Amino acid sequence: MNQNPPVPDIPIPERIWKNLPRRIEKRKIAVPQQKNEYDCGLFVLYFMERFIAEAPERLRRKDLATLGGRRWFRPEEASALRNRIRILLLEEFGKAKAGNCKKELKSSENSDEDG
C-alpha cells in the first residue's frame, strides 16, 4: 500500500492565527493554461500536485520565481492527469467490488450454516 504516515498535529499559537491575514501577501502568479473549456479542474489538481512536490518546506518570496510560470509544465501533462485519475478510480472501484463480493459470500455462507 502506498500511504503516507499521518502528519502530526502541530499546535499553532493563537497570536499567529490572529496576525496571519496581515502577513499573507496576495500575488497573481502566471501558470500554464488549458487550451479547452473542460480541463480547468485537471489543471488546478495538477498545479497543486506539482506545487506540493516541488515547493520548499518553508516557502519564501524568492521561491515564487521558481514555482509557476507559463512554462512550468506542458498543458499535455495536466491533461494526462485525467487518465491517471481514471485508472486510480477503476482500481478503487475494483477493490470495493471485491470487498463487497467477499462480504456477500461470507454472509451467504453464514446463512447456509444457520439454515
Image (cartoon, helix red, strand yellow):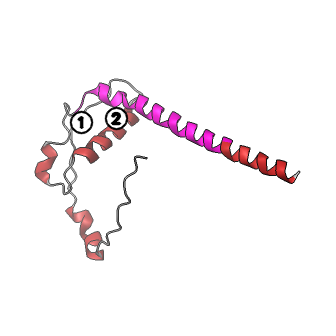
Label 1 packing within 10 angstroms: few (<14), some (14-19), many (20+): some
Relative image position of residue 74 (x, y in whole percent): 25, 27
Given residues 35 and 3, the one toward you in this image is 3
Relative image position of residue 31 (x, y in whole percent): 24, 36
Q: Quadrant of residue 59?
A: bottom left
Given residues 15 and 52, the one toward you in this image is 52
- Give the magenta part as a residue range: 73-101
Q: Earlier in the sequence, mark 2 or mark 1?
A: 1
**Which residue occupies 22% across, 64% down?**
22
Label 2 packing within 10 angstroms: few (<14), some (14-19), many (20+): many
Say which amino acid is labelled 1: Val
Say which amino acid is labelled 2: Phe
User: Which residue appears farthest toward the right when viewing the image?
Assistant: 115
Answer yes or no: do the residues labelled 2 and 1 have beta carbons within 8 Å? yes
User: Which residue appears farthest toward the left when viewing the image?
Assistant: 62
Given residues 8 and 72, the one toward you in this image is 8
Q: Which residue is mark 1?
A: 31
Secondary element at image label 2: helix
Relative image position of residue 81 (x, y in whole percent): 38, 32
Query: Please, what is the dominant secondary structure of the magenta stretch?
Result: helix
**Which residue occupies 75% across, 49% down?**
107
